[in-house]
Image: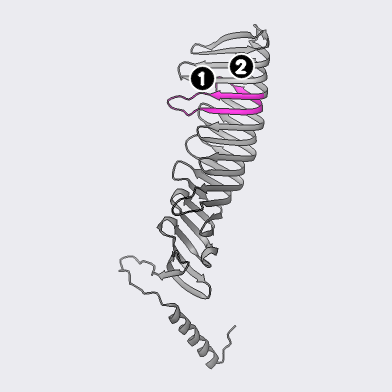
Amino acid sequence: MTANVTFAAESDATSELQADEIEYDMDTGQATAKGNVNIQHQEEAEKDASHLEADEVEYNMETGQAKATGNVYIQHKETPEKVPSELNADVVQYDVNQGVMTAAGNVLLRQGTARATGRRAMYNSKTREAYLLDDVIAIRDNVRITCDRLLSDGAGHMQADGNVHGIQTIEPSEKYPNGDTRTFLGDHVDYFPDDRKHIVIPNGGLVTSGDGNFTADNMEGWMDEEYYIGTGNAHAISPPREMEAGGDKIEYFGKEGGKAILTGNAWAIQENNTMRGNRLTIYLADDRNLKVKPLPSPKDNQPTQKITAPSVEEFEVFEREKISNQKNSGGTTK
């Protein structure tokens, strides 16, 4: 037989407790419920409703403090301002009135289309802020992130720390007949999924795609746009095109057929062909032939001069002349 207790904790909030067995102290408002525990909490002013299930719950209806253990499930229903959310865990400490809960053991948090797991978590159902710790896995749409710690502010921003590894899986398309996989690595990553899957890796990291690998001291990118910016010791390697390039800064435009703009001590190598300059534009052609266009750095109030890139044959002639001059002057060449 199921027992029921209904209590109005505030003028605009009510809680209803159901369980197979309930012990209730009317002086303290403390209730201990066991077996098929079910708590419904409704706040009329905020149109907010929550639902809790567990094997056992200690619940103070005066303070709204609850401790749930065993197969804990908490649901917050959708409102005009908030997406629905769900929390599963082994143990949850829950402030029903404030909407704040801390969870431990097999934590699974769902919020809209996003879901995340970890060993421990803190979640605020009113602000939708979430903080997960230890062996964290977060998934939203086609992006999966693993890390040691994850903070979500509930407003389209995730902050991942510690051994961050993100993967975006692209379905097969005309451009990618076999699909594509893009990854990012770093010790700290800021991720904005609503802004074209914007990532910021301020302390250095690695980004990979079907075209190759991309590293820099400071990295930023929009994965949906295939647009990345790396500053400080920027370095790109494209195994499919047998190409390597670097500079103080690299901008990569994947949607423009594979184009990279390198500035500051820029260089590019493909097979035995090398190009250097202060500013280079690299076109990664579909035929895997590297096309490099060196451009001068623009100067204030001065027209930009047009410079034609030398051909590979001209570059080889220059190399032979340099070697010949070194031998004639008594120098050595390694």
> Measured along the vertical axis of the image, is residue 275 above or below residue 198?
below
Q: Residue at x 43, y 27 (%)?
A: 81
Q: Nearer the viewer, residue 281 or 123?
A: 281
Q: Position of residue 282 (x, y in %)?
A: 44, 66
Question: For the residues marked 1 and 2, what is the alpha-carbon distance in whole angstroms?
Answer: 13 Å
Amino acid at dot 1: Ala
Q: Residue at x 54, y 54 (%)?
A: 207
> Measured along the vertical axis of the image, is residue 316 above or below residue 121?
below
**Residue 238, visible in the rendered structure:** no
Q: Relative to 150, is 176 on the left or the right?
A: left
> Measured along the vertical axis of the image, is residue 320 above or below residue 91?
below
Image disc number at residue 256: none
Classed neighbour count for the residue bearing mark 1: other residues with Cα under 10 Å, few (<14), some (14–19), many (≥20): some
Q: Main secondary structure of the magenta part?
A: strand
Mark 1 lies on residue: 49
Tell me the magenta residue range.
Answer: 71-98
